[in-house]
Image (cartoon, rainbow, N blue to C red):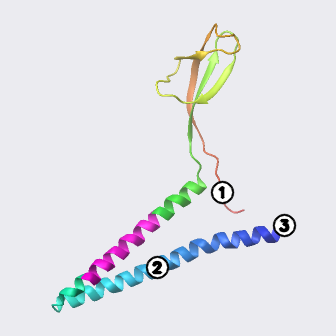
Amino acid sequence: MGEKTEGKESRQNLVPMLFFLVIGILMFLSMTLLVNGISRWREGDLVSMTYVIMGISGLLFSAMNITTFQSRIRRAFVGRSRVVSVLKCSKCGFELKRNFKEGDYIYGCGETCPSCKGQEPLVITSIYVEKPTPRIKLGQ
């Protein structure tokens, strides 16, 4: 059982390393193309502009992939937060916790109380953001 988790962890560590290795090589090649293109352009070679364009495109592609990778890692470590409205019946004390709906406000009336069989409306007592639960725990 422990061997399977070790293999999975080593693969998870290998993916980011390979990603940054490939991006590093692409950035190096892009910088080389950019420098060669600019030096040849100064000598009067107009075809060298393709090197400049390819170098800039490679750098932009690398930057775009790095920012996308960062946002995916951030989403993997931090779950999505949720805004919650808490409704309470003033008659029987029944409490309901549900997702926030546009138009909710403190002491506003919500749905009717299911415990009182629709006689009393539920009052919104609090609105808050639940902390997201981390999807991946660091150090494990």
* Residue at the disc numbered 1: 136
Who is closer to the viewer here, 110 or 140?
110
If you read the primary sequence from the N terminus, does the residue marked by circle 2 or circle 3 appear first? Answer: 3
Amino acid type, label 2: Gly
Residue 9 spot, x, y in % from top left: 70, 69
* Residue at the disc numbered 2: 24
**What number is the disc on residue 1?**
3
Query: Measured along the vertical axis of the image, is residue 72 above or below residue 101?
Result: below
Q: Which residues are magenta?
A: 50-67
Query: Measured along the vertical axis of the image, is residue 44 above or below residue 89?
Result: below
If you read the primary sequence from the N terminus, does the residue marked by circle 2 or circle 1 appear first? Answer: 2
Question: Which residue is most to the right?
Answer: 1
Residue at point 65% right, 14% down? 113
Residue 47 position by quadrant: bottom left
Q: Left or right: where does residue 135 sit relative to residue 18? A: right
* Element type at mark 1: loop
Residue 64 spot, x, y in % from top left: 41, 66
Who is closer to the viewer here, 131 or 120?
120
Amino acid type, label 3: Met
Who is closer to the viewer here, 36 or 53?
53
Residue 81 position by quadrant: top right
